[in-house]
Amino acid sequence: MVPIDVQQWRQNVILTRDLDIHTDRAQFFARARKGEFTALFRGVWVPTPLWISLSRAERYELRVKAAAAVDSEATFSHESAAVLWRLPMVGAWSVRIQTLAEESCGGRSNAMFQRHAAGVPFEFEHIQGIRVTSLARTVVDIARSLPFGVAVTMTDAALRRSVHPASGVPPVSLSQQTLLEELQLIPMRHGTAKARAVIEFASGLADRPGESMSRVSMRRARIPAPELQVRLRGASGKTYFVDFFWRGVDIIGEFDGAAKYRDPEFLRGRTPHAALLDEKWREDDLSPAGHGMSRWGWDIATSPDRLRAQLFAAGVCRNAAEVR
């Protein structure tokens, strides 16, 4: 993992501008040629063993931190702020570093840095010593610029923070109304209609990215909207929260991505095997209580056609016309 302490991560970022002595520079570049260091962008390096050990999200986070080491006054935005806010990304993170610039300065971008001339907000936050746009502004910028499904996933996660705070970032309480108000504060109007659609569709009840993407696919497939995180009673009398519930036909929908069996929040101290067994016993308890059940993973969650076919077969829709 990328070190959380600001001094620790800064020690892992090497700026060639700081290598003043000719001998130090020569020794460093000799080691770099041997592969001991990896260049993130011109003049900025990190130890190769650290880089290799990181996930895609952690690599992008480290790139943002490296950029902050170069320019401590920058205000990081869009995806660069989102990764520091610990928002989930569906698909690959960007390579470019995203910052805000004053409108009068224009957005001077290049292959590595994208500078948005949308105005620097009066209010911002610091995460691990790095200046970032507020969570509300970050979500609105994402909603304006990224594909609908990706933006909904991040917005769902941000709204969920009001009840389930994330560790390592400032606590924030958001609502759809506060996001719509934030949208009105941005001087640039491009993407406003798209952002409004994302915000109005988003829900803090979506527990994980797979649930958010399932909701997006349901919308695109014109599947009747389910209730989210509904408490139901099993045959044993025990109660459970289910991801999706179509009350009119008494059918439960569950996103069952493999990643959740590695998620400490989901495992709650259990081994992955124990969690898998608990899920089976949970389904075995709910089904005899008269509830239908349909489960799916990422391949179906991201395909409106496949999700439509599965839910039609499960009985969520009574006839084909309902899902067209």
Image: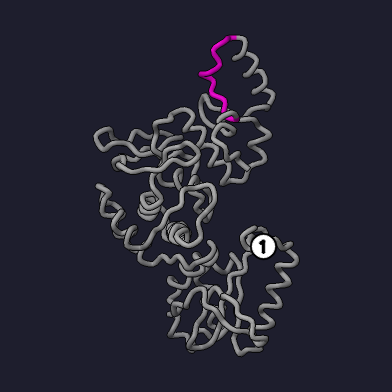
Quarter holding residue 234: bottom right
The answer to whether residue 185 is seen in the rendering is: yes
Query: Residue 183 at x, y = what percent?
Result: 30, 54
The answer to whether residue 302 is seen in the rendering is: no
Circle 1 residues within 10 Å: few <14, some 14–19, many ≥20:
some
117 sits left or right of 90 in the view? left
Residue 211 in the image: above or below residue 74: below
90 sits left or right of 106 in the view? right
Q: Residue at x 46, y 57 (%)?
A: 154
> Label 1's element?
helix
Query: Residue 229 at x, y = what percent?
Result: 52, 73
Query: Residue 69 at x, y = what percent?
Result: 49, 29
**Quadrant in the picture for the C terminus:** bottom left
Q: Residue at x 37, y 43 (%)?
A: 124
Quarter holding residue 195: bottom left
Region rendered in magenta:
12-22
In this figure, which residue is indicated by the disc labeled 1? 267
Answer whether residue 20 is magenta in the image: yes
